[in-house]
Image: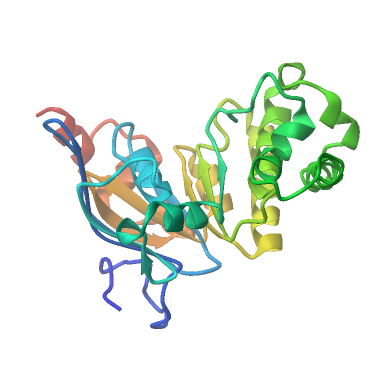
Amino acid sequence: MPKILPHGINRGMSDQTPKIRIRGLHKRFGAKRVLDGVDLDVPAGTSLVVIGGSGSGKSVLLKCILGLIEPDDGVIEIDGQDILRQSRGERELIRARIGMLFQNGALFDSLPVWENVAFGLLARHKATRADARARANDFLGQVGLAASVGDLSPAELSGGMQKRVALARAIASQPDIMFFDEPTTGLDPIMGAVIDGLIVDCVKRLGSTAVAITHDMASARRIGDQAAMLLNGRITWAGPAADLMDSRNPAVDQFTHGRREGPIQMELRR
């Protein structure tokens, strides 16, 4: 298997097929090139954190994998199957195996909490309403919420509780792949740490492969086994998440330490 970079995610890995394999991924919107040949591997059972500045293409990358955006070119493989070459029905089966925690929770205001959690089960007719309610209570318990919370509306919840409900919904289908979009946005540092801990526990309990995008470096190191940085539409660095604050890569060091001067600022001056 080819390595991504000298400090790539695959260092020390076996030749086992990665859970997610991306090669030469391109996406542009008009004249703006957002993804410009992204190469990335995510081994099964690991958690990858993708960092990068606003507009660097992190969310676009996730949406391409999810099938919400069609890339212009490239390969996206899940378990060795190129999903871009599959039929719509085959892609839907793949998407059903993915749990997603959206940045702002994306809860349905018109539904009580338990129906939000069980939404996928009910929509796919995988459970009766009575069974779905019981399972929703179980998933709420897994994120530290009482069953009584299920009767509340999302508007009655604090920001931290809404994140927990969104996480419960993400794990309700027991996915083998999980995506997290800025999971600690809008939370205070303590609640952010709580949510990160719940994410790690849930991912390990399910044995899932996880990909998270975040600006929060403390969160990145808590969630991630591995990390990668998007810059100018490509992966400019990849390595252990524990090395994020001492990567010896000028762009990564500038970003993780929040320095005004450095190669990223030079790019912004164009």
Quadrant hosting residue 25: bottom left
Residues 258 and 30: in front is 30
- Give me the residue at 40% from left, 45% from top: 62
The percent coordinates of residue 3 (x first, y second) are: 28, 72
Q: Name the residue at the top extreme.
A: 155
Residue 245 makes an appearance in the image: no
Residues 95 and 17: in front is 95
- Give me the residue at 77% from left, 48% from top: 127
Q: Tell me if 115 is positioned left or right of 244 in this view.
A: right
Position of the C terminus by quadrant: top left
Residue 74 makes an appearance in the image: yes
- Give me the residue at 64% from left, 46% from top: 124
Residues 177 and 9: in front is 177
The percent coordinates of residue 268 (x first, y second) are: 17, 30
Quadrant hosting residue 151: top right
Reply above or below: 216 against 83.
above
How many marks overall?
0
- Give me the residue at 63% from left, 32% from top: 189
Position of the N terminus by quadrant: bottom left
Residues 133 and 216: in front is 133
The percent coordinates of residue 55 (x first, y second) are: 29, 32
Scheme by which the image is coloured: rainbow
Reply above or below: 189 against 168.
above
The percent coordinates of residue 231 (x first, y second) are: 25, 45
Q: Tell me if 172 is positioned left or right of 238 in this view.
A: right
Q: Tell me if 82 is positioned left or right of 48 in this view.
A: left
Reply above or below: 105 against 139.
above
